[in-house]
Image (cartoon, rainbow, N blue to C red):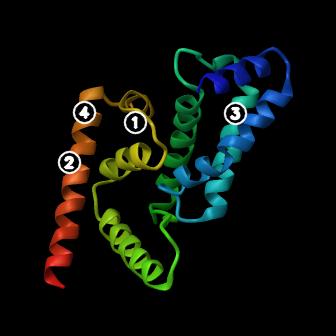
Amino acid sequence: MHDDTKLMHEFLAGSRDGFEKLIKKYHKPGIAFARRYVSDFHEAEDVVQDSFADLFVYKDRYNSTYSFKTYLFSIIRNKAINVYKKRRNIHPEQYEGCAESNPENDYLLSEMKDMVNIKFKVLNKDYQQALYLYEYENMSYKEIAVIMNKSLSKIKILIYRARKKLKIALEEYYYEQ
């Protein structure tokens, strides 16, 4: 995070190199985050590009009180919500897992990912977003609160409830098997 702030300050001082490094670092995570709202990879990519363009044009709005990642993801979220409102069609991205590779583990991991993805999709949208930011983007509760425009205690409750609902749904599924 400290490096991000340094790079952003370099950009604010006139160095495009700092901005390019931030783009390289956050392009893919930004797309993955935007896909929580929009169904199409290319739309998500457009949202991220628009977000970086806004950041470039309105660089004077940057507030170094927050981490750069939090600031950027807030912009991405707002732009993605606008696209989502127009389309009203959301399909969360499937995520790559990592485990020791062999045919049996690959099959079990694939099956587990598919089931988690299915159960994740039926969660409340706030649950999905909070859990995604926490688990996949490794953001703190405070950063998530800023991005989602909710209180810190509300974020803690959202993540707790999302985990609980996901766990119950998975247990029910595997109990039925």
- Label 1, label 3: how many angstroms apart (C-alpha)? 19 Å
- Separation of marks 1 and 4 at Cα, in angstroms: 10 Å
Q: Residue at x 14, y 78 (%)?
A: 175
* Mark 3 to mark 2 CA distance (whole Å): 34 Å
Query: Depth check: 112 or 126 in front?
Result: 112
Which residue is painted at 24% across and 29% down in the image? 153
Q: Nearer the viewer, mark 2 or mark 4?
A: 2
User: Which comes before the other along the chain, label 2 or label 4?
Assistant: 4
Indicate the amino acid at tag 2.
Arg
Residue 42 percent location from the top left of the image: 67, 62
Instruction: Give the crowd class for mark 2: few <14, some 14-19, many >=20 residues within 10 Å.
Output: some
Instruction: Please tell me how crowded label 4 is: few (under 14), some (14-19), or many (20+) other residues with Cα within 10 Å.
Output: few
Q: Given the image, on which type of amino acid does mark 4 rest?
A: Lys
Residue lying at 65% horizontally and 51% vertically, measured from the top left: 28
- Quarter-wise, where is residue 9 in the image? top right
Q: Is residue 17 toward the left or the right of residue 31 in the image? A: right
Q: Is residue 47 above or below residue 59?
A: below
Pointer 3 residue: 54
Secondary element at tag 4: helix
Residue 127 position in % (x across, y down): 30, 49
Q: Which residue is mark 4?
A: 154
Asked if labels 4 and 1 touch by Cβ distance under 8 angstroms, the answer is no
The quarter of the picture where the N terminus appears is top right
Residue position marked by numbered label 1 in the rendering: 148
Amino acid beneath label 1: Met
- For the residues labelled 2 and 1, the Cα–Cα distance comes to 16 Å
Q: Is label 2 or label 1 in front?
A: 2
In the foreground, 3 or 62: 3
Residue wearing tag 2: 161
